[in-house]
Amino acid sequence: MKKHIISLVFIFPWLLSFGSEPANQQKNLDEIISRHIEAYGGQEKWDAVEALEIRGYFTGFSERNDFYTLKTANGKFFSTFNLGQHRLQEGHDGTTYWTIDPWQGFDYPRRINKAERHVFMQKTELFTPFYRWKERGFQVELKGTEEVDGLEMYVLTLTRPGMPEETWYLDTQTYLVYKSITPWADFAMAMVAESYYDDYREVNGLLLPHYMEQTFSTRHTVTEIGQVVINPGFDKGIFRMPACKHMEKLDALAGTWDVKVEFMTRSGSMHAFDQVTVPLKKRAGMFCRANISYEVNLPATTLYTLTYNRHSNRYQLVVYNELHSTTHLFDGKWMDGSLVFDNLPEEQQNEASAPSAGQQPLTQYVFTFGDEQTFLLERNRSANNGESWQQVKRLTYSR
């Protein structure tokens, strides 16, 4: 019996230390991060920051050019910089991540992939990913200490929801970030970047690195910050993915419209068959869409989708007819103030190749704009290869 008591004397303290280790580790982690935030100016001062405007120089592809970055406390972000001879833009409006990258053949915005999104998440940080990390659902773990360039570092891993792990190195003396190893992207391809942070300077009581050096794949970049403005004034629209300039001409189409539905009768006159209300939606300057339902003896529903094709440099109209379950594509261009769509061949057919008997006649849709309170959509058809058109249907939109 005495033998068992002696054993318990030695085992019990070990059990206590084992059970308290995770709690102590969490306490150490919280203390490190608290000192880390304090080193950058403190929680209270950073809570008062709504946005940062940053200017300086960025060296990429061995060329040094100016850059501009604007980012907010709620994660919105815009930046423009050079990679060699090309000027890039990238942004996040709180919903959509986008970039304009001429190196990839895009002179217009595109959405980004998951690897690029992880990069943007790092770029949108005001100063450190450990700021409010629990509120944002990040997972953080203290791995211990490690010597880097002769300096002792706390090594922390951080994982954002749905993203790969990042490793951050905090100086045990200053509690500032010295280095990070994080997932990155190059030409939309996932890879790993090693980044160093230096030249910390105070701006209105906040400490920020003014020199960052990064290596990934065969790339080497340098960011030199020259000016930081706390809580600048700015246009909120800067974060949105830019609209196609051709689609901007159709901004007035968006909204809810009262539509008079008219068809050509056998007597050769237009007759009103129905009056309906139609919402016309426009998304991010990329397309316009209207779903219209009316009755002309039988119920009919038609979905119109209007876009701009950057390859052909033409507008396009997709018309889906629910009654007949048919979809047709029409190319369009501006003619005498109207936007005209038809299904004529790209090269006008000559008389010898005109439609033969029994072939379907060609179709034409014409958008004619008055003021912002009205426009017409006409459907015409041609039996002589587009030499002349006969009006079949007219939709008068007003509000």
Image (cartoon, rainbow, N blue to C red):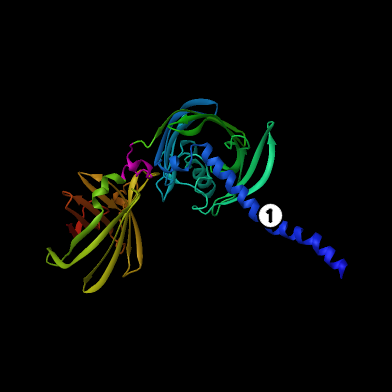
Q: Is residue 132 above or below residue 219?
A: below
Describe residue 375's horizontal placement relative to residue 118 as left or right: left
Q: Residues within 10 Å of mark 1 (few under 14, many from 20)?
A: few
Q: Position of residue 368 (x, y in %)?
A: 19, 50
> In the image as oriented, which residue stretches furthest toward the front?
2
Residue occupying image coordinates x 88% and y 66%: 3
Query: Label 1 sits on what residue type?
Result: Glu
Residue occupying image coordinates x 49% and y 43%: 120
254 or 379: nearer the eye? 254
Describe residue 236's horizontal placement relative to residue 260 as left or right: right
Magenta span: chief secondary structure: loop
Q: Position of residue 98 (x, y in %)?
A: 44, 45
308 or 121: nearer the eye? 121
For the C terminus, give its image quadrant: bottom left
Residue indicated by mark 1? 21
> In the image as oriented, which residue stretches furthest toward the bottom?
297
For the N terminus, give its image quadrant: bottom right
Q: Position of residue 375 (x, y in %)?
A: 18, 53
Kindly indicate the quadrant of the structure image that contains residue 260: bottom left
Kindly indicate the quadrant of the structure image that contains residue 314: top left
Q: Position of residue 192 (x, y in %)?
A: 61, 41
Q: Which residues are magenta?
A: 233-246
168 or 37: nearer the eye? 37
